[in-house]
Image (spheres, helix red, strand yellow):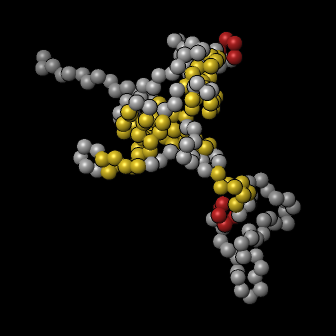
Amino acid sequence: MTRVFDTEGRALAVTMVKLLPAKVTQIKSDDKDGYSAIQITSYKNEEKANVLRSTEFRVEDLSGAKAGSILKIDFENGDFVSIQGKSKGKGFAGTIKRHGFKRGPETHGGNNVREPGSIGAQQPQRVTKGRHMAGHMGYDTITVKNLKVVDINNDIMLVSGAVPGPRKSVLKIYGKAVKAEPAVEETNE
């Protein structure tokens, strides 16, 4: 993350996102596969064939899509995008860190300082589903919506705000296909 200044001199917090070349590897159609989608593969270095990730995007219109073609980025300044990625993984965490539990008593014979305490009643004599307990924390799929594209320069895109995941993680960028209608001029007739 960094900051840039707009035309009025206000500081904007932005995230620099590098746009990697993406090649269409497969086209799925309603007739053959039951749904229409484009499967793409992004490369860190195409000469060395460093494949980062293959993923699928569901689309309604498959016209003009051919296997082997390179996708063109058509975002403009001021567009709003949604960015999806994996959040930072934090490993195995206890109930205090993971769910915000309070600590138990430290004095007067208390021996459950950082433990969850009681986890159930006499009925139903099992641990109920969804019980907040210690376990794996982080590394979830997160989508941040309505991030504004501040600037695009070659293959670097500046997006206002923060995006999910650690540095150098792979992100999916979804653009909104909302176009403003042309203004209607009024006539004095």
Placement of 135 over or under 58, stated as above or below: below
Name the spot of residue 53 as percent of width and height, x first: 63, 32
Name the spot of residue 177 as percent of width and height, x first: 44, 26
Q: Residue furthest left?
A: 188
> Image quadrant of residue 133?
bottom right
Placement of 133 over or under 27, stated as above or below: below
Placement of 145 over or under 124, stated as above or below: above
Q: Residue at x 61, y 50 (%)?
A: 88
Q: Residue furthest front?
A: 48
Pick the front one: 49 or 172: 49
Quadrant in which the C terminus appears: top left
Q: Is residue 10 visible?
A: yes
Left or right: 24 with respect to 73? right
- Count the labels in the image: 0
Q: Residue at x 37, y 49 (%)?
A: 3
> Image quadrant of residue 120?
bottom right
Q: Residue at x 69, y 12 (%)?
A: 32
Placement of 76 over or under 112, stated as above or below: above
Left or right: 59 with respect to 110? left
